[in-house]
Image (cartoon, rainbow, N blue to C red):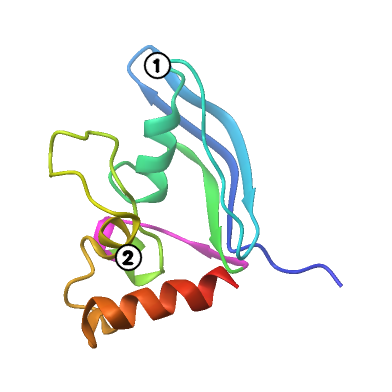
């Protein structure tokens, strides 16, 4: 049986004027997996992740979350779908632990209802 991906990007395109930042990008993220997006400066990595997180809208293409086609209008909508983003601009905040990075921006969520110990336990549960 084929498991429905957690996230699927299909034929994502984004241009800024004459610059075609993303061209027909496909990405499938299975539930419980971790992916790294790598490439040279200017390759479109941040643009693609910004589309997934709702900072930008794709010119064309589809985003599916748990098999359902969605529109991610802003970061609040992304977070509501379980999508978070840790930004690459390291000077915005102090160095954080993995736990602190995961809960960053989720201060009002149920994940932190029991404090960092509850979040740590949840991370360990997700890890297995």
Q: Position of residue 110 (x, y in %)?
A: 28, 84
**As drawn, is 62 to the left or to the right of 48?**
right
Magenta span contains residue 120 = no
- Count of numbered circles in the view: 2
Kindly state the secondary structure of the residue where label 2 is placed.
helix
Q: Residue at x 64, y 50 (%)?
A: 28
Label 1 sits on a secondary structure element that is loop
Marks 1 and 2, how far apart at CA? 26 Å
Q: Residue at x 61, y 57 (%)?
A: 33
Q: Left or right: 99 with respect to 59?
A: left
Question: Left or right: 56 with respect to 60?
Answer: left
> Is 68 displayed left or right of 80 in the figure?
right
Q: Residue furthest bottom?
A: 114
Q: Which mark is residue 2?
A: none
Marked residue nearer the N-terminal end (1 or 2): 1
Q: Which residues are magenta?
A: 67-76
Q: Which residue is mark 1?
A: 42
Residue 9 percent location from the top left of the image? 57, 47
Q: Which residue is mark 2?
A: 79
Q: Is residue 22 above or below residue 77?
A: above
């Amino acid at each position: 049986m084929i498991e429905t991906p957690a996230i699927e990007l299909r034929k994502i395109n984004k241009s800024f004027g004459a610059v075609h930042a993303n061209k027909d990008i496909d990405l499938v993220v299975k539930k419980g997996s971790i992916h790294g997006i790598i490439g040279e400066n200017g390759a479109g990595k941040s643009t693609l992740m910004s589309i997934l997180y709702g900072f930008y809208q794709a010119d064309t293409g589809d985003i599916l979350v748990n098999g359902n086609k969605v529109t991610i209008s802003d970061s609040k909508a992304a977070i509501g779908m379980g999508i978070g983003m840790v930004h690459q601009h390291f000077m915005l905040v102090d160095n954080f632990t993995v736990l602190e990075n995961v809960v960053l921006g989720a201060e009002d969520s149920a994940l932190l209802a029991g404090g960092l110990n509850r979040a740590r336990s949840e991370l360990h549960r997700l890890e297995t």
